[in-house]
Image: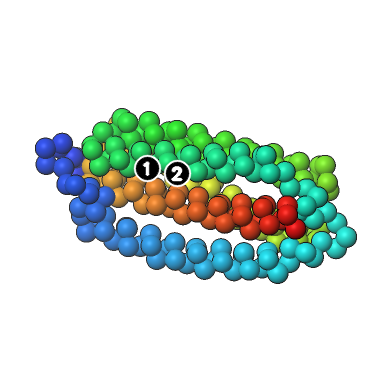
Amino acid sequence: MSHDHSLNPETMPQEPEKATLEGKNKFLGLWFFLGGETVLFASLFGTYLALRNSTAGGPSGQDIFGLELVFLMTMLLLTSSLTSVYAMYHMKNNDFKKMHLWLGITAFLGIGFLACEIYEFYHYITDFGFTFRSSAFGSAFYTLVGFHGGHVVFGLSWLIALMVRNAKRGLNLYNAPKYYTFSLYWHFIDVVWVFIFTVVYLMGKVG
């Protein structure tokens, strides 16, 4: 099946991501998906809050959390959200090269976030013996933060696949909705991280 809906700058729709019925359906479908994800994360947050003090004599958040690294992770992810906004701005202006440049920066920042998170988990396990099985607090922490990390991995895989597959195709009415829905998904996992930073790390550090 051919998807030759190449965009001419003079005839380009103002919102190429929603110019086709398929694009509108992708946009609507993503919102339903994110609604379900919101409920899922809300249940994980609720579980974490209920178990955050159940340390079974092991380390607590006050003992292990280092806000310097977590702040760096937060800056990396929030900056990646901003770079994805720049990418969508260039998409709407039909500048495929600049869109891909900013999406590449977004991916680079996301990989940096993941590297920090892997180091964080390694640090907790080797220096504090804080594992998934240490306590109910440990299980709730690794489930919530790890589940979010899994979403970052999925988002990065989605982005890299999009960029590689469309590198020589340019922007068209078929792939524009895919780039846009990725951007919305990326904003969603950034917002979730802000809640994790506040509920898990800040509240955990102050007790």
Q: Mark 1: few, some, or many residues within 10 Å (few <14, many ≥20)?
A: many
Residue kind at label 1, given as amino acid type:
Val
Residue kind at label 2, given as amino acid type:
Ser
| Furthest-left residue in this view | 10
Question: Residue at 32% of width from left, 31% of height from top?
Answer: 98
Q: Where residue 40 appears, x then y in whole percent?
A: 55, 66
Asked if the residues shown at circle 1 and circle 2 are in contact, with their CB atoms under 8 angstroms apart, the answer is yes
Q: Quadrant of the C terminus?
A: bottom right
Q: Is residue 70 left or right of residue 133?
A: left
Residue topped by disc 1: 85
Judging depth in this view, the residue of 164 and 136 nearest the camera is 136
Q: Is residue 173 left or right of residue 73?
A: left
User: CA–CA distance between discs 1 and 2?
Assistant: 6 Å
Judging depth in this view, the residue of 71 and 153 nearest the camera is 71
Colour scheme employed for the rendering of this structure: rainbow
**Quick one: SS at disc 1?**
helix
**Quick one: SS at disc 2?**
helix
Judging depth in this view, the residue of 18 and 46 nearest the camera is 46
Determine the image quadrant of residue 88: top left
Residue topped by disc 2: 81
Q: Where residue 1 appears, x then y in whole percent?
A: 24, 49
Judging depth in this view, the residue of 35 and 71 nearest the camera is 71
Residue 160 seen: no
